[in-house]
């Protein structure tokens, strides 16, 4: 087994000049161009529609529920919990929907 089989960092003394500074190496991958965003397989699929559904729930259904909440039940729940739960669900759904496996 040699050091090139491990796939990790391998010290190459030829990559440094006399002062100990790193010299330019021709086979360095850091100068390669990153992939173009359109090359990735991204579509507006069921994940996107799930996020849209959560946006509708958060910005239409929750305010309507607050508006039509009966006055004798308690506004503390209506004004704190009804907007909070859909907002947290929207945040979690947005993170889930934008991350790809």
Image (cartoon, rainbow, N blue to C red):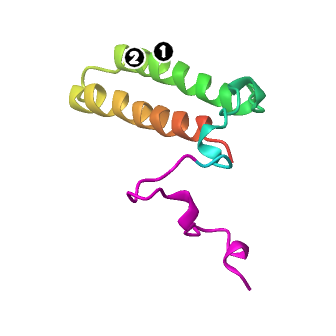
Residue 6 covered by magenta stretch:
yes
Q: Residue furthest bottom?
A: 1
Residue pictured at 59% horizontal, 28% vertical = 51
Residue pictured at 55% horizontal, 46% vertical = 24
Residue pictured at 40% horizontal, 36% vertical = 85
Tag 2's secondary structure?
helix
Which of the two residues, 72 or 49, is positioned nearer the viewer here?
Answer: 49
**Residue 81 spot, x, y in % from top left:** 32, 34
Badges 1 and 2: C-beta atoms under 8 Å apart?
A: yes
- Disc 1 and disc 2: Cα gap in Å? 6 Å
Q: Residue furthest front?
A: 18
Tag 1's secondary structure?
helix
Residue 53 covered by magenta stretch:
no
Which of the two residues, 7 or 77, is positioned nearer the viewer here?
Answer: 7
Q: What label sits on residue 23 in the rendered view?
A: none
Assign the magenta stretch its main secondary structure: loop
- The stretch in magenta equals 1-24
**Residue 76 spot, x, y in % from top left:** 21, 30
- The quarter of the image holding the N terminus is bottom right
Q: Is residue 21 above or below residue 81?
A: below
Where, by quadrant of the figure, is residue 50 drawn? Answer: top right
Which of the two residues, 9 or 37, is positioned nearer the viewer here?
Answer: 9
Q: Which residue is mark 2?
A: 63
Q: Which residue is mark 1?
A: 60
Count of labels shown? Answer: 2
Which of the two residues, 64 or 48, is positioned nearer the viewer here?
Answer: 48
Q: Decide: few, some or many residues near mark 1? Use Cα within 10 Å; few <14, some 14-19, many ≥20.
A: few
Q: Is residue 56 above or below residue 100?
A: above
**Residue 72 spot, x, y in % from top left:** 24, 25
Residue pictured at 74% horizontal, 23% vertical = 38
Where, by quadrant of the figure, is residue 49 drawn? Answer: top right
Q: Decide: few, some or many residues near mark 2? Use Cα within 10 Å; few <14, some 14-19, many ≥20.
A: some
């Amino acid at each position: 087994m040699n050091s090139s089989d491990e796939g990790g960092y391998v010290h190459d003394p030829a990559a440094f000049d006399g002062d100990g500074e790193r010299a330019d190496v021709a086979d360095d991958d850091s100068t390669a161009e990153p992939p173009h965003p359109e090359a990735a397989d991204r579509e507006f699929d069921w994940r996107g529609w799930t996020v849209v559904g959560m946006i509708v729930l958060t910005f239409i259904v929750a305010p309507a529920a607050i508006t039509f909440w009966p006055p004798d039940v308690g506004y503390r729940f209506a004004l704190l919990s009804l907007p909070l739960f859909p907002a947290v669900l929207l945040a979690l759904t947005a993170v889930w929907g934008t991350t790809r496996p």
